[in-house]
Image (cartoon, rainbow, N blue to C red):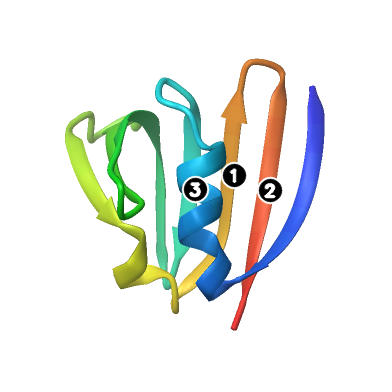
Amino acid sequence: MQKEYIVLKEDELEEFIIENFKEDAIVEISYNRVFIPGKILYIDDDASITLQLKGELLNQRVDIDINEVKKELVEIIHTYEDKSIIISIID
């Protein structure tokens, strides 16, 4: 699997998600003390992401507003086909 590491500023994240993330991709979002793995079902124009959670206990849909959590983001991993993009956020 091909891996790409990217460092983005908080204000660059929304545009990057809208332009590069794809529905049906797997995404892993780490922020604050929360880890959210799931499949992207939908990406809104403001970079809100609807996920189908992939967990042993939870398998529901959740909406993540990236703009609300971007100050607390540690890392986002976006995997589609044979490529993973690992995004670190700086302020």
Label 2 and label 1: CA atoms lie apart by 4 Å
At which x and y percent is residue 61? 18, 34
Residue type, numbered disc 1: Ile
At which x and y percent is residue 22? 48, 28
Q: Earlier in the sequence, mark 3 or mark 1?
A: 3
Camera-near label (3 vs 1) is: 3
Which of 73 and 22 lies nearest the eye of the viewer?
22
Residue type, numbered disc 2: Ile
Q: Is residue 60 left or right of residue 46?
A: left
Quarter containing the C terminus: bottom right
Graded by Cα atoms within 10 Å as few (under 14), some (14 to 19) or many (20 or more), the crowding at tag 3 reads some
Cβ–Cβ under 8 Å for marks 2 and 1: yes
Q: Earlier in the sequence, mark 2 or mark 3?
A: 3
Above or below: residue 81 compared with residue 62: above
Residue 77, numbered circle = 1
At which x and y percent is residue 52? 27, 29
Q: Residue at x 68, y 48 (%)?
A: 86
Quarter containing the N terminus: top right
Residue 63, numbered circle = none
Mark 3: secondary structure = helix
Which of 18 and 25 lies nearest the eye of the viewer?
18
Which of 26 and 60 lies nearest the eye of the viewer?
26
Pointer 2 residue: 86
* Quadrant of the image occupied by residue 37: top left
Graded by Cα atoms within 10 Å as few (under 14), some (14 to 19) or many (20 or more), the crowding at tag 2 reads some
Label 2 and label 3: CA atoms lie apart by 12 Å
Pointer 3 residue: 17
Q: Earlier in the sequence, mark 2 or mark 1?
A: 1
Mark 2: secondary structure = strand
